[in-house]
Image (cartoon, grey):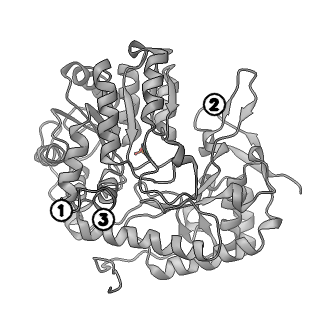
């Protein structure tokens, strides 16, 4: 088979540089050992997130020029609405400035204090929005999803038996809706099968519990379904996405992922009352319902990006890049979540740094070591991001200690990844010397974004 190549050529470049090791150490100390607090220009290869960090296509840049900035009923809104409807077939469509705005309004309008919202795995902002209004975010990931090495095709699936038990135990009136995150970012970027989405819907239907898809990476999930699930090989990614959304009553979306845009999001639903409540709060928080916190030009770029994300060749290339890095780390015996996910390679920090206890955040140890060794910025998805507290206020570690190397879309080339592999090699060789960390400041919600840390003396 021929080498898979980038299905684009580069028209515009942006310089990156590697500051000296001494400067990287000083920058990290100044950032209180929290890479979110670093200056981006001090990061050579920035794999903090795949959210809003992608490169837009020439078609998207051209579409920006068509932006209609009318306050209400703009042409750009009509184009955005038509594209989102083509993909989701939803009755009501609302733009928002990003995914969490859709989540926040959904949570505020639909969740009463004490109610619970099951999911395969809630993302951190989704969990925080649910908890902020007094709800409980419950993760019902399939058992295979917690096994970081089992080579199974759909480790992002929800455990249907656990879902049924959750409904029996708590009762449908306490469950305002159920969510499914595609692909499952928190669980290693693993996909969710169509049969699982269908089974979730079938389990909820008799109880009249609505299903909400967290659709951030819907196109990557559609690609996995085409590649891995029998019966989908002859379908287009658009057709697969349409079927996924056909099981949903509503969806939240961050267009910063599979909208291939730098900002934007949306909420869609079929229920008129849900739409009415959402619209009222949208006007208060985001803006008039035909722009929802976005400019006309953003709406144009997203309309183009959503369909580009469903281009099969683009997904083949994207997956090949993730696999390229994953295969080379596996060859070296470096512990990563297998199989590789859709938008990132996730290192297993617990296996990588077994000498660091969970509550000294092995993921932070690895993230900071990667930055010092090569100016690579990654992110911890472990006990710092997802840790909870028991009734006595004691911290409970997260089930997984992962470090995500997220791939901005259409941004880095193979030599960037070869450099990254060299840096990881160096960190792996010196792993025994990497310290754990302790918190010196934390906020009540989403603490990983702003917390301060210091190394624990070894
Ligand atoms: C699965 C998932 N849901 C929701 C969000 C929130 O989206 P946004 O960052 O646009 O608010 C993210 C962002 O990373 C995500 O990965």
Q: Nearer the viewer, residue 95 or 216?
A: 216
Identify the mark at residue 234; answer none if there is no mark: 1
> In the image as oriented, which residue stretches furthest toward the bottom?
2
Cα–Cα gap, marks 3 and 1? 28 Å
Question: In the image, what residue occupies the spot 48% across and 21% down?
Answer: 133
Query: Which label belongs to residue 56?
Result: 3
Kindly indicate whether the residue at mark 1 contacts the one at mark 2 (C-beta within 8 angstroms): no
**Horizontal and vertical percent position of residue 48:** 53, 58
Who's the residue at 30% across and 28% down the image?
282
Cα–Cα span, label 2 and label 1: 48 Å
> Which residue bears the numbered disc 2?
444
Instruction: Determine whether 292 is above or below 231 in the image.
Output: above
Which of the marked residues, 2 or 1, is nearer the chain's N terminus? 1
Judge whether 267 appears above or below 421 on screen: above
Q: Residues within 10 Å of mark 3 (few under 14, many from 20)?
A: many
Q: Left or right of 270: which side holds 189?
A: right
At 50% across and 29% down in the image, what residue appears? 137
Dot 1 alpha-carbon crowd within 10 angstroms: few under 14, some 14 to 19, many 20 or more: few
Q: Earlier in the sequence, mark 2 or mark 3?
A: 3
Q: Position of residue 440 (x, y in %)?
A: 77, 42
């Amino acid at each position: 088979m021929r080498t898979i190549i980038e299905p684009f050529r580069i028209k515009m470049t942006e310089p990156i540089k590697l500051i000296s090791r001494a400067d990287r150490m000083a920058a990290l100390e100044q950032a209180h050992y929290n890479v979110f607090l670093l200056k981006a220009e001090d990061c050579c290869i920035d794999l903090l997130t795949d959210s809003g960090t992608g490169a837009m296509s020439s078609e998207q840049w051209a579409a920006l020029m068509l932006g209609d900035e009318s306050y209400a009923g703009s042409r750009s809104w009509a184009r955005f609405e038509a594209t989102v409807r083509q993909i989701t077939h939803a009755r009501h469509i609302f733009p928002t400035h990003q995914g969490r705005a859709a989540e926040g309004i959904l949570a505020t309008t639909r969740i009463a204090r004490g109610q619970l919202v099951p999911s395969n795995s809630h993302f951190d902002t989704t969990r925080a929005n649910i908890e902020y209004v007094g709800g409980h975010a419950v993760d019902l990931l399939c058992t295979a999803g917690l096994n970081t090495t089992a080579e199974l095709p759909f480790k992002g699936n929800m455990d249907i038996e656990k879902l049924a038990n959750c409904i029996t135990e708590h009762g449908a009136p306490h469950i305002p809706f159920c969510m499914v995150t595609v692909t499952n970012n928190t669980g290693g970027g693993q996909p969710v099968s169509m049969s699982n989405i269908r089974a979730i819907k079938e389990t909820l239907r008799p109880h009249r519990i609505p299903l909400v898809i967290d659709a951030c990476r819907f196109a990557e999930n559609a690609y996995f379904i085409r590649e891995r699930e029998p019966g989908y090989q002859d379908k287009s990614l658009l057709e697969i996405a349409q079927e996924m959304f056909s099981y949903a009553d509503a969806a939240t979306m961050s267009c910063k992922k599979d909208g291939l845009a730098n900002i934007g999001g949306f909420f869609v639903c079929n229920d008129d009352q849900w739409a009415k409540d959402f619209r009222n709060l949208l006007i208060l928080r985001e803006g008039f319902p035909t722009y929802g916190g976005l400019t006309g030009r953003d709406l144009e770029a997203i309309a183009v990006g959503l369909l580009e994300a469903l281009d099969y060749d683009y997904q083949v290339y994207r997956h090949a890049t993730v696999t390229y890095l994953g295969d080379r780390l596996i060859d070296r015996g470096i512990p990563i979540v297998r199989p590789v996910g859709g938008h990132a390679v996730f290192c297993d920090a617990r296996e990588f740094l077994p000498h660091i206890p969970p509550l000294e955040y092995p993921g932070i140890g690895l993230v900071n070591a990667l930055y010092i060794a090569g100016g690579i910025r990654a992110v911890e998805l472990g006990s710092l991001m997802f840790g909870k507290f028991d009734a006595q206020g004691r911290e409970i570690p997260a089930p997984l200690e992962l470090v995500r190397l997220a791939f901005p879309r259409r941004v880095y080339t193979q030599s960037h990844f070869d450099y990254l592999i060299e840096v990881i090699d160096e960190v792996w060789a010196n792993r025994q010397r990497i310290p754990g960390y302790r918190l010196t400041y934390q906020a009540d919600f989403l603490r990983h974004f702003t917390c301060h840390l210091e190394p624990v003396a070894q």
